[in-house]
Image (cartoon, grey):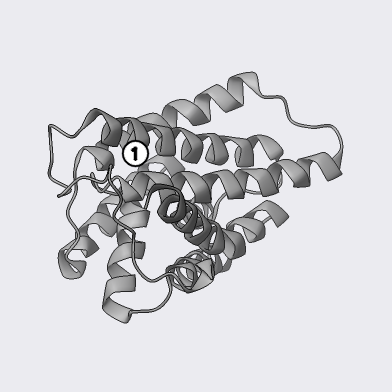
Amino acid sequence: MFLKIKNVPNVWWSSDKPLNFKPKISTFLFLCFGLILFGLGEGLLIVSFTGASPWSVLAQGISLNVNLSIGTITLFISIGVLFLWIFLDQKPGIGTVLNAVIISVMIDLCINFVPTPTSYIYQLILAICSVVLVGLGGGIYVVANLGPGPRDGLMIGLQKKTNLPIALVRALLEITVVTIGWYLGGVVGIGTLLFAFGIGPCVALGLYLVNKLFN
Protein backbone atom coordinates (compact mmCIF):
# COMPACT_ATOMS: atom_id res chain seq x y z
CA MET A 1 0.00 0.00 0.00
CA PHE A 2 1.59 3.27 -1.15
CA LEU A 3 0.34 5.22 1.88
CA LYS A 4 2.67 3.15 4.08
CA ILE A 5 5.86 3.99 2.15
CA LYS A 6 8.57 5.19 4.53
CA ASN A 7 11.63 5.44 2.30
CA VAL A 8 12.52 7.07 -0.99
CA PRO A 9 13.21 4.11 -3.33
CA ASN A 10 16.49 3.65 -5.14
CA VAL A 11 16.17 2.63 -8.81
CA TRP A 12 18.63 2.08 -11.65
CA TRP A 13 18.65 5.74 -12.64
CA SER A 14 19.03 7.11 -9.10
CA SER A 15 22.27 8.97 -8.34
CA ASP A 16 24.60 7.34 -5.81
CA LYS A 17 24.88 10.62 -3.91
CA PRO A 18 23.12 14.02 -3.91
CA LEU A 19 26.36 15.99 -4.44
CA ASN A 20 26.88 14.60 -7.93
CA PHE A 21 27.72 17.23 -10.56
CA LYS A 22 28.18 14.68 -13.35
CA PRO A 23 25.08 12.46 -13.11
CA LYS A 24 24.04 9.92 -15.71
CA ILE A 25 21.97 11.39 -18.56
CA SER A 26 19.00 9.23 -17.52
CA THR A 27 19.22 10.54 -13.95
CA PHE A 28 19.31 14.15 -15.14
CA LEU A 29 16.40 13.62 -17.55
CA PHE A 30 14.19 12.02 -14.89
CA LEU A 31 15.09 14.84 -12.50
CA CYS A 32 14.03 17.45 -15.05
CA PHE A 33 10.89 15.52 -16.02
CA GLY A 34 9.80 15.27 -12.40
CA LEU A 35 10.44 18.97 -11.79
CA ILE A 36 8.51 19.92 -14.95
CA LEU A 37 5.48 17.95 -13.68
CA PHE A 38 5.92 19.51 -10.23
CA GLY A 39 6.08 23.04 -11.65
CA LEU A 40 3.17 22.38 -13.99
CA GLY A 41 1.06 21.30 -11.03
CA GLU A 42 2.02 24.38 -9.00
CA GLY A 43 1.17 26.60 -11.96
CA LEU A 44 -2.18 24.94 -12.62
CA LEU A 45 -3.16 25.36 -8.97
CA ILE A 46 -2.59 29.10 -9.30
CA VAL A 47 -4.48 29.21 -12.62
CA SER A 48 -7.42 27.30 -11.10
CA PHE A 49 -8.15 30.28 -8.82
CA THR A 50 -9.23 27.94 -6.03
CA GLY A 51 -6.55 28.95 -3.53
CA ALA A 52 -2.77 29.11 -3.21
CA SER A 53 -0.54 26.34 -1.88
CA PRO A 54 -0.05 26.13 1.91
CA TRP A 55 3.44 27.65 1.82
CA SER A 56 2.12 30.61 -0.22
CA VAL A 57 -0.63 31.08 2.38
CA LEU A 58 2.05 31.12 5.08
CA ALA A 59 4.07 33.73 3.18
CA GLN A 60 0.93 35.81 2.66
CA GLY A 61 0.01 35.60 6.34
CA ILE A 62 3.49 36.68 7.45
CA SER A 63 3.47 39.55 4.91
CA LEU A 64 0.34 40.95 6.55
CA ASN A 65 2.22 41.24 9.83
CA VAL A 66 5.63 42.51 8.67
CA ASN A 67 6.65 45.15 6.15
CA LEU A 68 8.02 42.75 3.51
CA SER A 69 6.71 41.45 0.17
CA ILE A 70 5.40 37.91 -0.25
CA GLY A 71 8.30 37.14 -2.61
CA THR A 72 10.87 38.29 -0.06
CA ILE A 73 9.18 36.31 2.71
CA THR A 74 9.05 33.21 0.49
CA LEU A 75 12.81 33.53 0.01
CA PHE A 76 13.37 33.85 3.77
CA ILE A 77 11.12 30.85 4.43
CA SER A 78 13.15 28.76 1.94
CA ILE A 79 16.40 29.85 3.59
CA GLY A 80 14.95 29.01 7.01
CA VAL A 81 13.88 25.55 5.83
CA LEU A 82 17.32 24.94 4.33
CA PHE A 83 18.84 25.90 7.69
CA LEU A 84 16.75 23.16 9.32
CA TRP A 85 18.43 20.67 6.99
CA ILE A 86 21.52 20.93 9.19
CA PHE A 87 19.64 19.13 11.97
CA LEU A 88 18.01 16.65 9.58
CA ASP A 89 21.16 15.44 7.78
CA GLN A 90 19.91 16.58 4.37
CA LYS A 91 22.31 17.54 1.57
CA PRO A 92 21.67 19.87 -1.38
CA GLY A 93 22.62 19.16 -4.99
CA ILE A 94 21.92 20.32 -8.52
CA GLY A 95 18.33 19.22 -8.00
CA THR A 96 17.98 21.80 -5.24
CA VAL A 97 18.99 24.57 -7.66
CA LEU A 98 17.00 23.24 -10.64
CA ASN A 99 13.98 22.92 -8.32
CA ALA A 100 13.77 26.70 -8.06
CA VAL A 101 14.58 27.38 -11.72
CA ILE A 102 12.35 24.84 -13.49
CA ILE A 103 9.36 25.26 -11.19
CA SER A 104 9.49 29.05 -11.57
CA VAL A 105 9.57 28.74 -15.38
CA MET A 106 6.65 26.30 -15.43
CA ILE A 107 4.56 28.50 -13.16
CA ASP A 108 5.13 31.48 -15.46
CA LEU A 109 4.22 29.40 -18.53
CA CYS A 110 0.98 28.25 -16.91
CA ILE A 111 0.01 31.76 -15.85
CA ASN A 112 0.69 33.14 -19.35
CA PHE A 113 -0.74 30.37 -21.51
CA VAL A 114 -3.31 28.36 -19.52
CA PRO A 115 -6.70 30.08 -19.14
CA THR A 116 -8.71 29.82 -15.93
CA PRO A 117 -11.82 27.65 -16.48
CA THR A 118 -15.06 29.63 -16.41
CA SER A 119 -16.95 26.88 -14.57
CA TYR A 120 -16.24 26.37 -10.87
CA ILE A 121 -16.53 22.61 -11.34
CA TYR A 122 -13.75 22.68 -13.94
CA GLN A 123 -11.69 24.89 -11.64
CA LEU A 124 -11.97 22.22 -8.94
CA ILE A 125 -11.04 19.48 -11.42
CA LEU A 126 -8.01 21.53 -12.47
CA ALA A 127 -7.05 21.97 -8.80
CA ILE A 128 -7.29 18.22 -8.18
CA CYS A 129 -5.17 17.49 -11.28
CA SER A 130 -2.61 20.04 -10.12
CA VAL A 131 -2.17 18.33 -6.74
CA VAL A 132 -1.75 14.94 -8.42
CA LEU A 133 0.85 16.36 -10.82
CA VAL A 134 2.83 17.98 -8.00
CA GLY A 135 2.81 14.70 -6.08
CA LEU A 136 3.83 12.54 -9.02
CA GLY A 137 6.47 15.02 -10.13
CA GLY A 138 7.81 15.24 -6.59
CA GLY A 139 8.04 11.47 -6.35
CA ILE A 140 9.96 11.23 -9.64
CA TYR A 141 12.51 13.97 -9.05
CA VAL A 142 13.22 12.98 -5.43
CA VAL A 143 14.09 9.44 -6.55
CA ALA A 144 16.78 10.92 -8.84
CA ASN A 145 18.67 11.67 -5.57
CA LEU A 146 20.32 14.82 -6.88
CA GLY A 147 19.19 17.00 -4.00
CA PRO A 148 15.57 17.88 -3.11
CA GLY A 149 13.98 21.31 -2.91
CA PRO A 150 13.68 22.94 0.52
CA ARG A 151 10.21 21.56 1.36
CA ASP A 152 10.88 18.06 0.04
CA GLY A 153 14.19 17.93 1.89
CA LEU A 154 12.36 18.88 5.07
CA MET A 155 9.83 16.11 4.41
CA ILE A 156 12.53 13.48 3.83
CA GLY A 157 14.53 14.59 6.86
CA LEU A 158 11.52 14.54 9.18
CA GLN A 159 10.53 11.12 7.88
CA LYS A 160 13.97 9.73 8.70
CA LYS A 161 13.84 11.22 12.19
CA THR A 162 10.30 10.03 12.98
CA ASN A 163 10.11 6.84 10.86
CA LEU A 164 6.52 7.76 9.97
CA PRO A 165 5.08 7.12 6.48
CA ILE A 166 6.04 9.80 3.95
CA ALA A 167 2.37 10.51 3.14
CA LEU A 168 1.63 11.27 6.80
CA VAL A 169 4.76 13.39 7.32
CA ARG A 170 4.05 15.54 4.25
CA ALA A 171 0.36 15.91 5.10
CA LEU A 172 1.12 16.98 8.69
CA LEU A 173 3.75 19.40 7.43
CA GLU A 174 1.43 21.06 4.91
CA ILE A 175 -1.53 21.19 7.34
CA THR A 176 0.68 22.80 10.00
CA VAL A 177 1.97 25.40 7.53
CA VAL A 178 -1.47 26.33 6.18
CA THR A 179 -2.89 26.54 9.72
CA ILE A 180 -0.19 29.00 10.77
CA GLY A 181 -0.66 30.98 7.56
CA TRP A 182 -4.44 31.12 8.03
CA TYR A 183 -4.04 32.21 11.67
CA LEU A 184 -1.79 35.05 10.54
CA GLY A 185 -4.38 36.21 8.01
CA GLY A 186 -3.52 34.28 4.85
CA VAL A 187 -6.40 33.43 2.51
CA VAL A 188 -7.32 29.74 2.31
CA GLY A 189 -9.38 28.31 -0.55
CA ILE A 190 -10.65 24.85 -1.44
CA GLY A 191 -7.56 24.36 -3.63
CA THR A 192 -5.37 25.10 -0.61
CA LEU A 193 -7.13 22.42 1.41
CA LEU A 194 -6.95 19.95 -1.47
CA PHE A 195 -3.20 20.54 -1.62
CA ALA A 196 -2.66 20.36 2.14
CA PHE A 197 -4.52 17.07 2.57
CA GLY A 198 -3.77 15.53 -0.82
CA ILE A 199 -0.10 16.23 -1.49
CA GLY A 200 1.19 13.66 1.01
CA PRO A 201 -0.69 10.71 -0.50
CA CYS A 202 0.13 11.92 -4.04
CA VAL A 203 3.87 12.10 -3.32
CA ALA A 204 3.69 8.61 -1.80
CA LEU A 205 1.83 7.42 -4.93
CA GLY A 206 4.56 8.90 -7.12
CA LEU A 207 7.27 7.08 -5.14
CA TYR A 208 5.28 3.84 -5.27
CA LEU A 209 4.79 4.01 -9.07
CA VAL A 210 8.46 4.81 -9.69
CA ASN A 211 9.52 1.89 -7.51
CA LYS A 212 7.11 -0.49 -9.28
CA LEU A 213 8.02 0.60 -12.79
CA PHE A 214 11.81 0.78 -12.45
CA ASN A 215 12.68 -1.93 -9.90
What x and y, as percent, mark residue 152? 36, 55
Q: Amino acid at mark 1?
A: Asn
**Which residue lies at the image location 54% right of the left edge and 41% below the top edge?**
42
Q: Which residue is mark 1?
A: 99
Q: Is residue 41 above or below residue 56?
A: above
Residue 93 makes an appearance in the image: yes
Q: Is residue 68 above or below residue 30?
A: below
Instruction: Please state if 51 lies on the left or on the right of 180 as rendered.
Output: right
**Which residue lies at the image location 27% right of the left edge and 46% below the top edge?**
12
User: Front-most of 137 and 48?
Assistant: 137
Residue 67 makes an appearance in the image: no
Q: Is residue 152 above or below residue 94?
A: below
**Which residue lies at the image location 29% right of the left edge and 32% below the top edge?**
26
What x and y, as percent, mark residue 195? 60, 56
Q: Secondary structure at mark 1?
A: helix
User: Front-most of 109 and 18?
Assistant: 18
User: Front-most of 80 and 171?
Assistant: 171
Instruction: Please state if 103 lies on the left or on the right of 110 as rendered.
Output: left
Instruction: Please state if 120 lies on the left or on the right of 40 as rendered.
Output: right
What x and y, as percent, mark residue 143? 33, 50
Mark 1, residues whose alpha carbon is within 10 Å: few (<14), some, or many (≥20)?
many
**Which residue lies at the image location 21% right of the left edge and 61% below the top edge?**
85
Q: Is residue 65 above or below residue 3?
A: above
Q: In which quadrant will I find the N terminus?
A: bottom right
What x and y, as percent, mark residue 65? 47, 58
**Residue 190 lies in what quarter of the image?**
bottom right
